[in-house]
Image (cartoon, coloured by chain):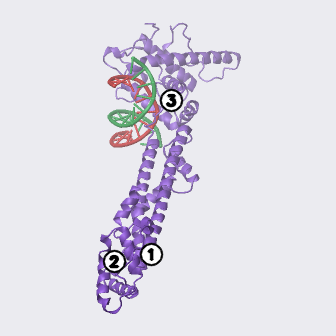
Chain colours: A purple, B red, C green
DNA sequence: CTAAATGATTAGTT
DNA sequence: AACTAATCATTTAG
């Protein structure tokens, strides 16, 4: 509405009050032009010209009446042709051959984007395709379907608004164009209006409307961009992993504390178990490592918890394995070398130091099972032995394979470096709590 | 409401 | 290419 009014204003010289065209009574012309011939002619013409010149000053009804009068004047055709001739020679022809619409690059850009986002293109398919593309670009393949549908719903909303608005504009444009054309056609009986002029006027109207459409497109693009960024930037709308997932991850982390770098396969498996993506697993481990290292003290409790948990699990598994190996042939690898330990009854443990101190983590001979048991138990022991307590004020990286460099593990250095101040003998059970 | 926890991103390193 | 460290933006706990 507002836009229409604005456009109407900006199209100069076109009277828009066509609604009341029929309102006026056909008043008699100022002169009885049928009666007086001959002498009054010159004065007549002057009179007519005067009327023409002042026609815009008059009220609509009045003007309408006079126009009608002039239309019926017998001199009208001659006058009209003269006016046409004059007009031809003056201004308007110059402006006729002027602007051809150059394809606005920005408009093209907007159109392309809207098409790509599925706002402008085909009804349903485009939208979901764009949404899928967005989801794929964000990294997660088939993850959050809730947010995905949310995205699609919002996009559909935008598309709907866009289309209704566009339609509205189109309709208004057409309506207005036909209106103006009718008006001009009607006026062309009174004043000289070339088809070119009408064309030009239509062009102006269309340009005006298309500029409004461009605003609409721009706004739509902005909305889509905001929506998209909101969904693409996963930092927004972050969801914490499920309790179970963090449990699994923590279990793995603390049971591989000496080397918490899961292989690609391990990551995949963890991802599967936690129903998250592999990169999320990587993220998690990256964060965990750095945060653990940064403040080991803060994670003591958690470490104990998970270490104990995995220790129990491992013990169970080991017990089962021992039973198996006792019953079966002793082909189980490593079962005798370092994996033997007694499981804690009430928190106390007694372990042989060789099995814990030997730095065989990098060694390929050690099976993963035993490895994790060793890690876990090492951890438990070091915890309960009160190795590095953050309360001590000086966070020492004396634990595990975390070296002073900040690196997690130095493969070349044997484990004797691990705890220079504390001998292996300090490891013993201690239920200090 | 504030602060801690947390998942994700980014720049820089190896 | 994977990792670290710093940082962001959000969620959750206090």
Q: Residues within 10 Å of mark 1 (few under 14, many from 20)?
A: some
Residue corresponding to mark 2: A95
Marks counted in the figure total: 3
Image location of residue A234, percent across then percent down: 45, 39
Left or right relative to A62: residue A384: right
User: Is residue A143 positioned above or below A43 on the image?
Assistant: above
Which is closer to the viewer, label 2 or label 3? 2
Q: Residue furthest bottom?
A: A38
Left or right relative to A333: residue A283: left
Name the residue located 64 percent from the left edge and 23 percent from the top edge.
A332
- CA distance for labels 2 and 1: 20 Å
Q: Nearer the viewer, residue A116 or B11?
A: A116
Name the residue located 46 percent from the left edge and 46 percent from the top edge.
A228
Q: Nearer the viewer, residue A32 or A195?
A: A32
Q: Determine contact: label 2, label 3, CB under 8 Å.
A: no
Secondary structure of residue under mark 3: loop
Q: Nearer the viewer, residue A330 or A228?
A: A228
Image location of residue A299, percent across then percent down: 42, 20
Secondary structure of residue under mark 2: helix
In the rendered structure, which disc, 2 or 3, sits on the residue that comes first in sequence? 2
Q: In which quarter of the view is residue B1 placed?
A: top left
Q: Residues within 10 Å of mark 2 (few under 14, many from 20)?
A: few
Q: Quadrant of the C terminus of chain A?
A: top left
User: Is residue A415 positioned above or below A197 on the image?
Assistant: above
Residue corresponding to mark 3: A241
Residue corresponding to mark 1: A185
Image location of residue A231, percent across then percent down: 47, 42
What chain is tagged by disc 2?
A
């Amino acid at each position: 509405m507002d836009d229409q009014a604005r456009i109407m204003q900006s199209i100069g010289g076109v009277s828009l009050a066509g609604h009341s065209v029929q309102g006026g009574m056909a008043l008699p012309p100022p002169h009885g032009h049928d009666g007086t011939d001959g002498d009054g002619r010159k004065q007549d013409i002057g009179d007519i010209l005067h009327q023409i010149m002042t026609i815009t000053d008059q009220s609509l009804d009045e003007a309408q009446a006079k126009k009608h009068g002039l239309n019926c004047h017998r001199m009208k055709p001659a006058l009209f042709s003269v006016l046409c001739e004059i007009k031809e020679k003056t201004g308007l022809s110059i402006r006729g051959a002027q602007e051809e619409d150059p394809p606005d690059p920005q408009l093209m850009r907007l159109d392309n984007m809207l098409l790509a986002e599925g706002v402008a293109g085909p009804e349903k398919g485009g939208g979901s395709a764009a949404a899928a593309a967005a989801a794929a670009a964000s990294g997660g393949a088939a993850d959050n379907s809730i947010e995905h549908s949310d995205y699609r719903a919002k996009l559909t909303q935008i598309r709907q608004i866009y289309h209704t608005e566009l339609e509205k504009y189109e309709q208004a444009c057409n309506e207005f164009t036909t209106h103006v054309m009718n008006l001009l056609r009607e006026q062309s009986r009174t004043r000289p209006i070339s088809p070119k002029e009408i064309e030009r006027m239509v062009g102006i109207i269309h340009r005006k409307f298309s500029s409004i459409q461009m605003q609409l497109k721009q706004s739509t693009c902005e909305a889509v961009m905001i929506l998209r960024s909101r969904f693409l930037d996963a930092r927004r709308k972050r969801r914490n992993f499920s309790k179970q997932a963090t449990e699994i991850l923590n279990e793995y982390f603390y049971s591989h504390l000496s080397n918490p770098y899961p292989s690609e396969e391990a990551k995949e498996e963890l991802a599967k178990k936690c129903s998250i993506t592999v990169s999320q697993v990587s993220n998690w481990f990256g964060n965990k490592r750095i945060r653990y290292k940064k403040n080991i003290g803060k994670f003591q409790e958690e470490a104990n918890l998970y270490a104990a948990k995995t220790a129990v699990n491992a013990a169970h598994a080991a017990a089962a394995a021992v039973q198996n190996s006792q019953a079966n042939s002793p082909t189980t690898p490593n079962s005798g070398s370092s994996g033997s330990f007694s499981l804690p009854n009430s928190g106390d443990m007694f372990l042989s130091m060789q099995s814990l101190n030997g730095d065989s983590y990098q060694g390929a001979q050690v099976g993963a099972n035993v490895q994790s048991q060793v890690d876990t138990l090492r951890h438990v022991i070091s915890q309960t032995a009160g190795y590095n307590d953050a309360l001590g004020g000086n966070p020492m990286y004396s634990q595990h394979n975390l070296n002073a460099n900040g690196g997690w593990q130095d493969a070349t250095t044997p484990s004797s470096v691990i705890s220079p101040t504390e001998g292996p003998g300090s490891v013993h059970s201690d239920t200090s709590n």
